[in-house]
Image: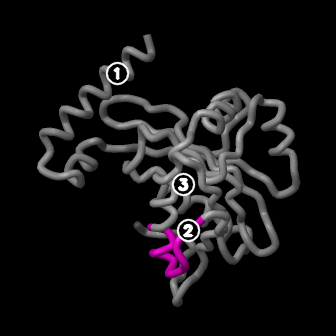
Amino acid sequence: TQRTQMYREQVLRKAARQQAPSFEVFLQQLQVRIDLRRPNASEMARVCQLSQRTNQMNSTQLRFANEELLKDWAAGDGRWILAAWVSDRYGDYGLVACAFCSTAAEAALVECLCMSCRVLHRGVEEKLLAKIAAEAEEQSLEQVLIPLLRSPRNDLMLNFLNRVATWAEVAPASEGSLVPVGRHKGRGSLAPAM
């Protein structure tokens, strides 16, 4: 089954991690590939599933119970979904992250950023944010805003947003805060290079 194959792949990754002299070497050996794009109609069920099942890496707990609700949300002016598919030398993780974005004034607003913990620390969250920033720049938007609504389980998202805030040289993330990523201190790009 697919689940059995995923377990086998995870055993291989764990063994590779234990044999690697450092986490950086392990990541290089994994040969992670990240495909960022808009999901198509046949992938919306998985997008809904990610919105419902992610807790630790979920910025606002925005949930879509079914595809119809997701389609209604996406039909709003200036809204788009950016998703990440990840694979490595051991196998395919599939669609593992989504950003639910909208345009608000002069900014791209990430209404919710959610990601499976299976790909945490593989560079996915950074690449996804960089792609959002690139799309914001293409639309002549000045910054990317990432709200945070704390939950009992989303400390991992808080930590990620605090790394982003440090890079952007803005106040750390806190309950209800917006982490703005803009052209800070003369940087030419909205995208963090973390």
Q: Magenta part of the protein: which range?
A: 163-174
Q: Give the amino acid at mark 1.
A: Tyr
Residue lying at the far top of the rendered structure: 1
Q: Is residue 1 left or right of residue 83?
A: left
Q: Which residue is mark 1?
A: 7
For residue 184, the mark is: none
* Of the pair 54 and 99, the residue shown nearer to us: 54
Disc 2 crowd, CA 10 A, few/some/many (<14, 14-19, 20+): many
Q: Give the amino acid at mark 2.
A: Ala
* SS at circle 2: loop
Whole-number angstrom distance, CA of label 2 to CA of label 1: 35 Å
Q: Position of residue 58 (x, y in %)?
A: 58, 48
Q: Which residue is mark 3?
A: 128
Mark earlier in primary sequence (2, 1): 1
Label 1 close to label 3 by CB (< 8 Å): no
Q: How many marks?
A: 3
Q: Which residue is mark 2?
A: 173
State which quadrant residue 146 falls in: bottom right
